[in-house]
Image (cartoon, rainbow, N blue to C red):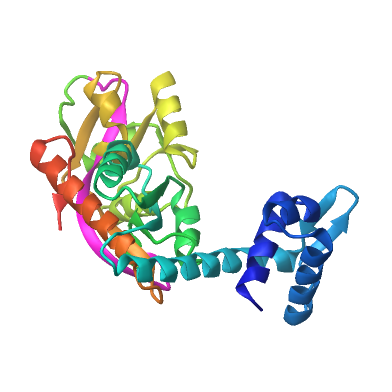
Amino acid sequence: MRLDQLRYFVAAAERGSISEAARRVHLAQPAFSAHIKALEHDLGVQLFERRAKGVVMTEAGKRFYDGAVALLRHAEQIRHEAQSSSGTLSGEVRIVLASSITPLLAGQVFVQAQRLYPQVRLSILDLLRVASENLVTSRLVDFALLPNATTLAGSLSEPVLSQDLYLVGRKFPNGIGDVIDFKELHHFPLVMGGRHNQLRIDLENTAARRSQRINVISEQDSLSVYRSIVLSGDYYTVVPYSAYSVEIESGCLRAARIVRPSVERTISFVWHEYSEISAPAKVIMELLRESISDMIAAGTFRGRLL
């Protein structure tokens, strides 16, 4: 199994066509097809089903694809590590940010990276936690900045900050100001993640320990969906302040910090336990850490550095 064969396989998988993939890599189609067949023979599995309008990956091909992409990325990282030893950082850095902190951090970190490290190509992903975890464990990203990282098997993590949770909605009953007792949450119809959502698990565990409950009336899996529902009716959600800071500070939504007890979540850097973080990825990690610290000091980001 050779790296060039992996590149040809990935090209065919992404194009869905042997002929288009061959043109993409500037190789004659018969030679391209021979490389794919040699790779299949080496692996002992069929990677593609040939159809009249192109090719589609088999189940074995789908399982092989993520590993092939990760291996190619790792090879590219090694090349850029060697080049970076001359003093100029270069290469691609792919990261995942928790959806609740993306609106505040993504733009700022991207602009700083472009200014300070113009040869580094930074790609920022904003996905559900489960999808983000898959990218970490399959080594398709350099690192992630995610909540509850200690629950992710096969990874290493470093805590960065702790965030309080807030009840958020369009309006609150009279008497509720900037804080709300945990025991009052059951009065509010909540839109939250499903039963495997870690934030919801933490809330329900806290409620159970106190013989209380929360009132989840709709299970959704997107902060943008939460936002749309909460903005459209008398519904609420529980999130870190940073998730909807723009809407809260513009007056579209209200937020009350949950107290007695307060509920926090920890955001950590996460990376694959057997992956060495590249030099370009390390500088992006430090940019994120500095940005968070500066924004907390300026009062534009609510959280506590760890």
Residue at x 25% of width, y 21% of height: 173
Residue at x 24% of width, y 47% of height: 116
- Compared with residue 135, is residue 218 higher up or lower down, i.e. above or below? above
Relative depth, front residue between 10 and 242? 10
Q: Can you tell which quarter of the image residue 180 is in?
A: top left
Q: How many marks?
A: 0
Q: Looking at the image, can residue 253 be seen?
A: yes
| Residue 66 spot, x, y in % from top left | 59, 64
Determine whether, in the image, residue 9 is placed left or right of residue 19.
left
Of the 4 image quadrants, the one containing the C terminus is bottom left
Relative depth, front residue between 211 and 129? 129
| Residue 115 spot, x, y in % from top left | 26, 43
| Residue 159 spot, x, y in % from top left | 23, 61
Residue at x 36% of width, y 35% of height: 237
> What secondary structure characterizes most of the magenta part?
strand
Q: Can you tell which quarter of the image residue 285 is in?
A: bottom left
Q: Looking at the image, can residue 261 be seen?
A: no
Q: Can you tell which quarter of the image residue 72 is in?
A: bottom right
Relative depth, front residue between 198 and 62? 62
Of the 4 image quadrants, the one containing the N terminus is bottom right
Q: In the rendered structure, which segment of residues is drawn in magenta? A: 151-173
Q: Does the magenta segment cover residue 196?
A: no
Determine whether, in the image, residue 260 is placed left or right of residue 95.
left
| Residue 261 spot, x, y in % from top left | 18, 48
Relative depth, front residue between 225 and 262? 225
Question: Given the current orientation, which residue lies at the most extreme right position?
Answer: 52
